[in-house]
Image (spheres, rainbow, N blue to C red):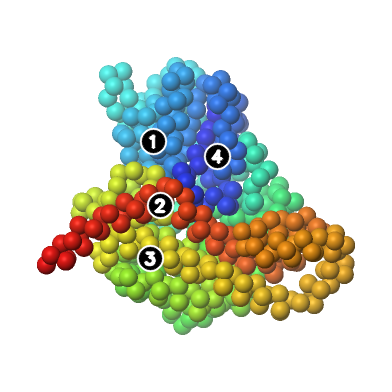
């Protein structure tokens, strides 16, 4: 069969778009379908537009979605169905909203979909029965929704030998800024707002270390790597074995991963650091860790069921920095325990602890989570437009402030952290510390010297800084650029943050939504004045 798979882009500007990273569900499904003899091509909209002429000739079209991208996928699926082509949608949102999904497509593949898709394709090819395909939802001949029993999670022994996702099936895969590699699924924790364990379970299943190393070998010359695990450090013995294997095989690209703050501790109770792990991370090429710090309020951390304290965060950031590893702090603002002071407190904390980059998102209800069920029960959802459920929009009525105050508090917090003043201060500090190397660049790199006057002029305009960096990269040898990148990586990321805040607040859809939240405040202000 000719099968085409699509990962839609989030509507509007999204902080995650810069990474140009596909999710790995479709490449894994693509690999299993190709191995079964099918013709597969994948479109990831952040990398390349969908070729609708190609789609029109498909025998089956599949979509992978998050909550925020489901409306786009639904529109695409309806367009494809209009051509008489069967459609199937998977991902966390439709897993828990399968009846909704079936209003727009023919099939829903719930939870882990790689085996479900192979069985579905086989049934369609043979005109066989759908009744025995675990994890599949569809409509019967009478139009009634049928939800087959859930598919059991892939057993650990089978998971160990899962094939590597076929990134080469993605149109435009050459544009990826990082190579995404998955080593394990699941998370043993149970944060209140997170859908991971409801999608993949709390039992963590891991691929064999040798298989991961072989995949790294395949991408040896492709640049930086992002380990896509929800939590990279779960079983420390396995993590250390992987890092040692990377060092032994000289597979040490710049890499980054998501992990919890307390991963730095050998013994959390005594606060003893795990120097072995930190050394292995540094020596294997770790450039940055993405830590779900979530909040600087202990009360909020407890409400999130985070099992982490604020002191963990302080000490972990310092430990990573001591080993030359940058920290991206991910915070979730807007809990019932948060009041308007949380914004300045969070920015102050991030600056005082020298967190390199941050992500301030609003608490967002994802179907399948306890938080979502609670918000529905309490009638606190502000909109049923799930394209806004991306962390950038306030979609839940907060308890200790208005929705408008939460929305603008997050925007202003981002703007303060990523201000031009802070970017310039960081940039000048790094330049001063590395002045001998930078002077030597001008001596060694003739192309850079020739472009210096133009680059100096452009650098006076913050909006042109990305162009300056691109021109500098083109003017340098690969070795010199890598050294310079180590110096400039954080100012570059801060610059992106500055530009992202400006672009997000200026787009028409953001202005319209903020205006809507502002209008929601007016009746409350009028009532307060009357009283």
Of the image marks 3 and 2, the number of the one nearer the N terminus:
3
Residue behind mark 4: 45
Residue 184 is situated, as x and y percent measured from the top left of the image, at 52, 53
The CA distance from mark 1 to mark 2 is 40 Å
Considering depth in this image, is 331 or 99 the residue closer to the camera?
331
Crowd rating for badge 1 (residues with CA inside 10 Å; few <14, some 14–19, many 20+): many
Of the image marks 2 and 4, the number of the one nearer the N terminus:
4
Residue at (60% x, 38% y) in the render: 48
Residue at (32% x, 63% y) in the render: 405
The CA distance from mark 1 to mark 4 is 26 Å
Q: Which mark is residue 511?
A: 2
Residue behind mark 3: 409
Q: Is residue 61 visible?
A: yes
Q: Is residue 131 left or right of residue 144?
A: right
Q: Are the two marked residues, 1 and 3, in contact with CB atoms closer than 8 angstroms?
A: no
Residue behind mark 1: 135
The CA distance from mark 4 to mark 3 is 31 Å
The CA distance from mark 3 to mark 2 is 15 Å
Crowd rating for badge 4 (residues with CA inside 10 Å; few <14, some 14–19, many 20+): some
Residue 138 is situated, as x and y percent measured from the top left of the image, at 35, 27
Of the image marks 1 and 2, the number of the one nearer the N terminus:
1
């Amino acid at each position: 069969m000719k099968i085409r798979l699509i990962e839609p882009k989030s509507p509007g500007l999204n902080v995650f778009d810069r990474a140009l990273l596909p999710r790995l569900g479709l490449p894994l499904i693509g690999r299993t379908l190709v191995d079964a003899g099918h013709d597969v091509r994948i479109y990831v909209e952040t990398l390349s537009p969908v070729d609708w002429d190609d789609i029109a000739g498909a025998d089956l079209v599949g979509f992978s979605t998050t909550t925020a991208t489901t409306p786009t996928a639904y529109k695409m699926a309806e367009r494809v169905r209009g051509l008489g082509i069967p459609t199937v949608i998977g991902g966390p949102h439709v897993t828990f909203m399968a009846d909704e999904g079936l209003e727009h497509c023919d099939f829903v593949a719930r939870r882990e979909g790689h085996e479900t898709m192979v069985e579905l394709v086989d049934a369609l090819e043979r005109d066989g029965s759908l009744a025995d395909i675990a994890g599949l939802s569809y409509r019967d001949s009478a139009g009634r929704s049928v939800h087959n029993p859930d598919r059991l999670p892939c057993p650990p022994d089978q998971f160990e030998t899962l094939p590597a996702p076929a990134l080469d099936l993605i149109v435009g895969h050459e544009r990826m800024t990082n190579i995404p590699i998955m080593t394990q699924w699941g998370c043993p924790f149970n944060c209140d707002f997170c859908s991971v364990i409801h999608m993949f379970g709390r039992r963590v299943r891991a691929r064999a270390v040798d298989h991961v190393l072989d995949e790294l070998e395949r991408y040896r010359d492709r640049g930086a790597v992002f380990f896509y695990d929800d939590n990279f450090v779960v079983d420390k013995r396995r993590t250390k074995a992987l890092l040692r294997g990377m060092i032994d095989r000289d597979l040490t690209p710049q890499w980054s991963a998501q992990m919890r703050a307390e991963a730095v501790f050998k013994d959390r109770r005594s606060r003893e650091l795990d120097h072995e792990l930190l050394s292995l991370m540094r020596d294997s090429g770790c450039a940055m860790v993405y830590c779900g710090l979530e909040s600087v309020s202990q009360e909020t951390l407890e409400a999130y069921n985070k099992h982490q304290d604020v002191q963990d965060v302080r000490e972990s950031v310092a430990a990573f920095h001591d080993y030359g590893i940058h920290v991206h702090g991910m915070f979730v603002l807007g809990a019932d325990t948060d009041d308007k002071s949380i914004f300045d407190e969070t920015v102050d904390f991030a600056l005082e602890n020298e967190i390199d980059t941050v992500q301030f998102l609003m608490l967002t209800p994802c179907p399948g989570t306890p938080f979502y069920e609670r918000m529905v029960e309490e009638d606190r959802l502000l909109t049923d437009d799930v394209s806004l459920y991306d962390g950038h929009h306030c979609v839940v009525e907060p308890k200790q402030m208005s929705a408008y105050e939460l929305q603008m508090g997050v925007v202003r917090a981002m703007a303060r952290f990523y201000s031009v003043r802070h970017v310039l201060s960081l940039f000048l500090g790094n330049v001063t510390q590395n002045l001998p190397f930078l002077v030597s660049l001008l001596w060694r790199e003739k192309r850079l010297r020739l472009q210096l006057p133009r680059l100096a002029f452009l650098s006076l305009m913050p909006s042109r800084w990305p162009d300056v960096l691109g021109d500098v990269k083109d003017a340098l040898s690969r070795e010199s650029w890598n050294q310079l990148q180590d110096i400039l990586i954080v100012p570059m990321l801060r610059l992106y943050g500055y530009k992202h805040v400006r672009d997000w607040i200026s787009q028409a859809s953001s202005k319209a939504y903020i205006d809507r939240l502002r209008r929601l405040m007016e009746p409350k202000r009028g009532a307060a004045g009357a009283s």
